[in-house]
Image: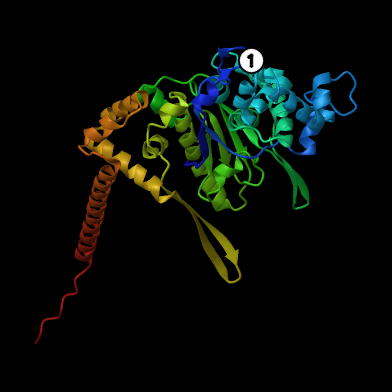
Amino acid sequence: MKVKQEAFYLSEELLTRQNKNVGQKRALFGTSPLIPINSGSIYGSDDYRNKLVASGLVPSMSRKGASKKMYVVTKFPRVVLWTLLILCFFTSQTPYAMAQETEDETIIKLALVLCPELGEFISSDNWFDNLSNPVLMTEEEIRERQQSYEKIFVCLSYIESELTLPNILKAVKTLFEYFIIFAGTYEDTTFKITERKGILNLLRAKRELVNLETTTDPAIVKLREKVGLPVPKGFVYIRYYPSKELMPKAVQPAFKSENTKAVTLLSRYVAVLSEPEVSVAKKQLKKRMLPKTVSHELVHVYINSNMSLLDRSKLPLWFHEGCAIYFSGSGGTESATEVSPTIGGYVYITYTVRDPKEYKEYKIVFNYLESKIGQESLYGFIKHAIEAGTIDQILASVGVPSFEDLLNDAKDWHSTRKNIKWGIILLILIIIIYLFWRMLPIEEKPPSV
């Protein structure tokens, strides 16, 4: 489903700034992709910190034999952070170099000193791809990656509690957090005990791992076998949340709209709002809607994983959402009715779920394209758009220069079809009424004398 996110672009000047201490050009953080970020963290609570202490990731205040470096940071964060910040600032050899040193670069140096695992991580090949699109095949690989990422995330969180992190470190920290939230092996990334009908229920954020190579989801089968797009390897990480309030703070901004039921973050992280339902009708409605919602997001994952973060931004929103709607069968209206007994009779209650207007328009556009150029040709144009990062062939196939023209033509086509449909229905009703009238017995009048 559609997600509105903040984004920023990392400065090439910052990434390749001259390091005056060593006299050589050094990129601080690899390439400069467009990185979506959300504010917030799930690790501010004492409860979660106790989990980390128990697991050995963060030493307690009195634990003996804990890592000396992390112990100092934990017990005396303010003194250590500001002391190292001053030392980092004055490490340059000349006044000119000192003047060139920015506050952001100084904090980055501080982070590399306090978080040695971060330095090792960003010095590895393809570190950004490994972080934003983690291709993992087993639970063991996930656990190993999780332990490494948690150490870096906790360290950056402590620095952030005392200093303002540069945008580049905020982005990297958010990427680590996304992995821990979605791919992490914890049963619940945020939890709360609620009482209902006298029973304590632990509301958990269920995690599901989906393999796109083997899943039988109808939309993914079409993309694999009909469209012929390469199948992304590794798991897709799905989290099901029983309410927006129980979502991690880093995920909540994506669900600001009341229409949002699921989102895909980065390449393969999926968050689904799966609220528990009490009434029979709502349960039936959820049973029909949830598979389409998940299928919709899996299409996003499939396409996103076949493109880089920058390349996928070249394709417009209507293409991304249109593909997800077209292949998953979502983008319509679902209803369910239940009968409730009342004093003196029964009441019929109908629950209806409607997708936003834009989604209905995207569905009309793709149905129009299929009717004009055929399903096989449409599949070929979709594949080309994803591989080439352009929709020019799709627009040219129906002879329009822009999406606005395509949408207008699609609406006219849809309106004509609807009028023809209702005309046929009306004609059938007239014929039925006429035949029924002909079957009625005709009373014969007695002959007049």
Q: Residue 212: where, in percent of width, then height?
A: 49, 24
- When asked about the image quadrant of residue 204, the answer is top right
What residue lies at 56% left-to-right and 39% top-to-bottom? 272
Q: In which quadrant is the C terminus drawn?
A: bottom left
Closer to the camera, 411 or 292?
Answer: 411
**261 on left or right of 222:** right
- When asked about the image quadrant of residue 141, the answer is top right
Looking at the image, residue 90 lies above or below residue 429: above
Looking at the image, residue 95 lies above or below residue 22: below
The reply to whether residue 34 is in sight is: yes
Closer to the camera, 1 or 94?
Answer: 94
Closer to the camera, 165 or 291?
Answer: 165
Residue under circle 1?
21
The reply to whether residue 133 is in sight is: no
**402 on left or right of 216:** left
What residue lies at 58% left-to-right and 23% top-to-bottom? 131
Q: Residue 138: where, in percent of width, then height?
A: 61, 17
Kind of residue sitting beneath label 1: Asn
What residue lies at 15% left-to-right and 79% top-to-bottom? 445
